[in-house]
Image: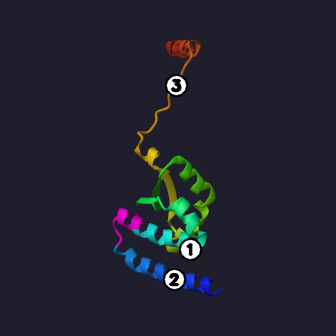
Amino acid sequence: MKKKRCLKTRWSQQNNRFKEKNLNLAHPVVKASYIWSVLSDQLCDVLGPAVHHQWFKEVKPLVISHNVLILEVPNHFSAQWIHTHYHELVDVLLSVMDKRLTSFFVSQSERHQPPKVAELNLSESSASEIKRQTEDQ
């Protein structure tokens, strides 16, 4: 029970500091970095150092855009795992700091790839049917 009270006190102190600094955190990259540092500490307290090290050690805050904290993880598997198992917890902790904030985890490979354009593989019959329909119009 004492540990719980200690965490609550520490978190409320962090939250108060965040509210005080929030006015000075106008730049979205700086704000993302600060919020992630507070959030990461809280995740370590809740999940324990081993789980935190496993899933959150390599997370890098990128930016806050449209009230979404965008966080980069090393690979697609990590992004999926965190989304499936920890996303709700992350968003609850974020909402304590700012009710409007939510999070999004993106992998390094997804972030550095150009967007994929859907490829259409039409069979000859499909292509000729489309051509015929456009000629009929």
* Relative height, residue 122 to residue 48 (above, below): above
**Other-residue count near label 1 (Cα within 10 Å), few / some / many at <14 / 14–19 / ≥20:** few
- Mark sitting on residue 120: 3
Q: Amino acid at mark 2?
A: Arg
Is 24 left or right of 84, judged from the image as shown? Answer: left
Q: CA distance from mark 1 to mark 2?
A: 11 Å
Q: Nearer the viewer, residue 116 or 128?
A: 116
Queried whether the magenta region covers residue 22, the answer comes back as no
Residue identified by numbered label 2: 10
Indicate the quadrant where residue 82 lies. Answer: bottom right
**Badge nearest the viewer, 2 or 3:** 2
- In the rendered structure, which disc, 3 or 1, sits on the residue that comes first in sequence? 1
Horizontal and vertical percent for residue 45? Answer: 56, 74
Q: Identity of the amino acid at label 3?
A: Leu
25, above or below 1, in the image: above
Which amino acid type is shown beneath numbered disc 1? Asp
Secondary structure found at label 2 = helix
Of marks 2 and 3, which one's residue comes earlier in the chain? 2
SS of the residue under disc 1: helix
Residue at 47%, 72% in the rendered image: 38
- Return the residue nearer the eye: 29 or 130: 29
Disc number at residue 45? 1
Label 1 vs 2, first from the N-terminus: 2
Does residue 81 sit above or below 128 in this rendering? below
**Range of magenta residues:** 25-33
CA–CA distance in space, label 3 to label 1 = 49 Å
Q: Residue at x 46, y 82 (%)?
A: 16
Label tally: 3
Q: Secondary structure at mark 3?
A: loop
